[in-house]
C-alpha cells in the first residue's frame, strides 16, 4: 500500500462506494509504489507552523465521534519530528470530553485549515497525554507569546496524512491577512493619486496596430494581484473568426518610448464562443516592458487592430485519455483546451501548479467547471506537482499537453522520454524561446544581402538580421510557428531548439532563425 492515508481511510465499504460512484479508478494509483504520506516533509511542517487552530476528533466509549476546536498562538501545534506532533492543551470549559475519550481510545483525527488559500491538511494518528512530571516535554510545547493557562500536553504519533482539494472551502481572512491584501493596493492608490495631482492629463490612446481584425477592449478583470484579463470584441459587433483550443492572438503594444511592438497571448476563453476573445496578461517586472505597458495602457474602449488568430498548439483528434498540465500563467491555453474537452465529453484531467493558491488565475472558475477533473498544486502551501508520478500513473497512449516555464518543460520532456512516451503524444507551448546551454558567438553570412553579421551568444540569428534592417518573415519568436524557417546546407551542424519542425525537416536543412543556431563559429544562409 503506497498512500498510508488511503490504507486507513479507504476501507472495503468505502472502496465499494467509490466504485459505485465511478471514482475508484481515480484513486487506484494510491495503492501502488513506495509508501508515502506518513512522514511529514518540510512543506507540511511549514504549513502546520502557520496555523493558529485546528479541529480534532476523538471516539467515545459509546462509539460516537466528538469533534472539538483547538486554538492558540500561530504554530502552537508543534512538529517535534517527521512523525510526531505535540500541543499544549489550554484551559477551556472544563468538560474534558476529548481528554476522557483518549483514555479509552487513543485514535485521533485532525483537520488544519488555511482559509485564505483554501487549503486543508488531514492527519490521523495516536495521541497520548504528557506525564505531568515530564517538564522537558511540557516546556517544549509551551509558547511564551500566548499566556493562556496550560492544563496538560499531548503528543501525537502520526500514522498518515492527506492534503484535500480546495473545493467548497470558502475563503475567510483575519485582520492581519486582510491588511496584507489591502495595504499594497492602498499604496498603489496613493501613488496613482499623487501622479494625477502632479501630472498634466495626457491624451488617451484610442487605437493601436494595423492588423485586419479590429477589436475593442470591452472588459477588464483583475484575476490575481499580477494577472489581468482583457475581453476583446469585434468593433463592428459581428461574430469573431472561429478559433480552436490553444489558439493565440498577436496584439499591438506601445512601449514607454512610444515604439509599437507585438506580443502573443493565448486566447483563454471557451473556443466555442464567437462573441469575444479573452486574453490574460501577467505583469512581469523584469520582462521586456510589454506586459507593463499593457497593464498601464489597455483600458475599456481601446481599439486593437490585430492579425487574425493562429494556433501553433492545437488539440489533436484522439479518443485517448488527455492530461493537461499548466504552471503559472501557462493555464491560459490549457483552460481553453479543458473547456473544449469538457464540451466534447472527452476523457481528460487537468494538473495546475503555482506558487500560491491566490496567485493562480481562473482557479475558482475551473473548480466549478471541472470538479474532480482538476488538481491544484501550490508550492507555498506544501503541495508540489510530481511530473514523474503523474507520467508513471497514467495509461498508455495518453496525450500530454504542457504549458509552463522552460525549466519545468525540460524536466517534463526528459521524463517523457525516459518513460517511453511517443513524441507524437507530447504537445507543449513554452513561455519564451528555449535557451541554449552551449551557445557561442558566431558569424552569420547573408549571401543575397552580401553581409557578414557578428552574432553574440545571447542574441538570436533572427534578432541579428532584424537589427541589420533586413526584413524577414517571423511571428512567435519561440520556435513554434515556422514563420522564420529557412533552408541551410543539410551538412551544417545545427542545435535545434524549436518545437515545430519534424526530424525529417531538420535532416534536410530546415532551421528556425528565432531559436536555433549553429554549433560551429560560422553559418551561411541564402538571405
Image (cartoon, grey):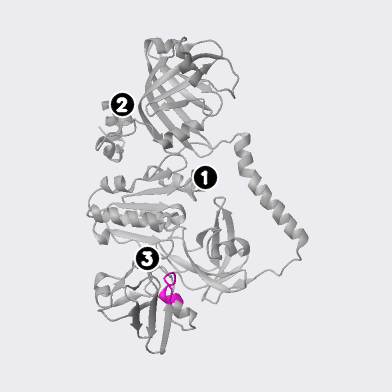
Q: Which one is in front in this view, the residue at disc 3 or the one at disc 1?
A: 3
| Contact check, label 2 and label 3, Cβ < 8 Å | no
Q: Is residue 460 magenta?
A: yes
Would you call the spot at circle 3 few (<14 residues within 10 Å), some (14-19), or many (20 or more)? some
3D distance between C-alphas at marks 1 and 2:
32 Å
Name the spot of residue 123 as percent of width and height, x first: 40, 27
What residue did someone put label 1 on? 358
| Contact check, label 3 and label 1, Cβ < 8 Å | no
At x 30%, y 59%, the residue is 426
Identify the secondary structure beneath mark 1.
helix
Q: Quadrant of the C terminus?
A: bottom left
In the image, the segment drawn in magenta is 455-463
In-front residue for pair 101/159: 159
What residue did someone put label 2 on? 8
Name the spot of residue 508 as percent of width and height, x first: 25, 78
Name the spot of residue 173 as percent of width and height, x first: 58, 36
Q: Is residue 403 magenta?
A: no
What residue did someone put label 3 on? 436
Identify the secondary structure beneath mark 2.
helix
Amino acid at each position: 500500500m503506497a498512500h498510508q492515508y488511503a490504507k486507513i481511510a479507504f476501507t472495503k465499504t468505502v472502496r465499494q462506494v467509490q466504485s459505485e460512484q465511478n471514482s475508484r479508478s481515480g484513486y487506484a494509483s494510491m495503492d501502488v509504489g513506495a509508501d508515502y504520506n506518513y512522514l511529514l516533509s518540510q512543506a507540511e511542517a511549514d504549513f502546520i507552523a502557520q496555523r493558529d487552530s485546528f479541529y480534532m476528533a476523538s471516539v467515545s466509549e459509546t462509539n460516537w465521534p466528538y469533534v472539538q476546536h483547538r486554538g492558540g498562538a500561530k504554530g502552537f501545534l508543534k512538529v517535534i519530528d517527521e512523525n510526531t506532533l505535540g500541543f499544549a492543551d489550554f484551559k477551556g470549559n472544563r468538560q474534558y470530553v476529548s481528554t476522557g475519550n483518549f483514555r479509552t481510545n487513543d485514535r485521533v483525527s485532525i483537520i488544519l485549515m488555511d482559509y485564505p488559500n483554501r487549503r486543508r491538511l488531514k492527519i490521523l494518528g495516536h495521541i497520548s497525554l504528557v506525564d505531568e512530571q515530564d517538564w522537558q516535554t511540557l516546556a517544549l510545547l509551551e509558547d511564551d507569546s500566548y499566556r493562556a493557562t496550560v492544563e496538560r500536553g499531548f503528543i501525537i504519533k502520526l500514522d498518515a496524512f492527506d492534503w484535500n482539494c480546495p473545493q467548497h472551502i470558502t475563503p475567510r481572512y483575519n485582520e492581519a491577512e486582510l491588511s496584507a491584501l489591502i495595504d499594497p493596493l492602498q499604496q498603489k492608490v496613493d501613488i496613482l493619486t499623487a501622479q494625477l495631482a502632479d501630472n498634466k492629463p495626457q491624451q488617451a490612446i484610442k487605437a493601436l496596430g494595423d492588423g485586419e481584425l479590429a477589436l475593442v477592449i470591452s472588459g477588464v478583470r483583475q484575476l490575481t494581484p499580477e494577472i489581468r484579463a482583457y475581453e476583446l470584441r469585434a468593433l463592428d459587433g459581428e461574430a469573431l473568426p472561429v478559433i480552436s483550443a490553444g489558439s493565440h492572438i498577436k496584439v499591438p503594444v506601445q512601449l514607454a518610448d512610444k515604439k509599437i511592438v507585438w506580443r502573443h497571448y493565448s486566447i483563454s476563453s471557451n473556443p466555442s464562443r464567437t462573441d469575444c476573445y479573452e486574453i490574460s496578461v501577467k505583469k512581469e517586472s523584469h520582462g521586456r516592458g510589454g506586459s507593463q505597458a499593457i497593464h498601464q495602457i489597455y483600458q475599456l474602449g481601446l481599439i486593437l487592430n490585430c492579425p487574425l488568430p493562429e494556433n501553433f498548439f492545437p488539440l489533436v483528434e484522439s479518443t485517448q485519455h488527455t492530461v493537461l498540465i499548466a504552471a503559472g500563467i501557462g493555464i491560459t491555453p490549457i483552460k481553453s483546451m479543458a473547456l473544449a474537452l469538457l464540451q466534447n465529453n472527452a476523457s481528460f484531467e487537468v494538473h495546475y501548479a503555482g506558487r500560491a493558491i491566490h496567485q493562480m488565475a481562473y482557479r475558482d472558475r475551473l473548480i466549478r467547471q471541472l470538479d474532480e477533473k482538476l488538481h491544484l498544486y501550490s508550492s507555498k502551501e506544501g503541495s508540489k506537482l510530481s511530473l514523474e508520478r503523474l507520467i508513471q500513473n497514467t495509461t498508455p497512449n495518453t496525450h500530454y499537453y504542457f504549458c509552463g516555464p522552460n525549466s519545468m518543460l525540460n524536466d517534463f520532456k526528459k521524463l517523457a522520454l525516459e518513460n517511453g512516451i511517443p513524441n507524437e503524444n507530447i504537445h507543449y507551448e513554452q513561455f519564451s524561446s528555449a535557451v541554449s546551454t552551449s551557445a557561442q558567438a558566431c558569424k552569420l553570412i547573408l549571401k543575397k544581402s552580401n553581409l557578414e553579421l557578428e552574432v553574440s551568444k545571447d542574441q538570436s540569428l533572427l534578432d541579428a538580421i532584424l537589427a541589420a534592417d533586413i526584413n524577414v518573415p517571423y511571428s512567435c519568436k519561440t520556435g513554434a510557428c515556422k514563420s522564420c524557417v529557412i533552408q541551410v546546407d543539410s551538412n551544417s551542424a545545427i542545435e535545434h531548439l524549436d518545437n515545430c519542425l519534424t526530424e525529417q525537416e531538420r535532416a534536410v536543412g530546415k532551421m528556425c532563425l528565432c531559436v536555433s543556431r549553429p554549433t560551429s563559429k560560422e553559418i551561411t544562409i541564402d538571405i
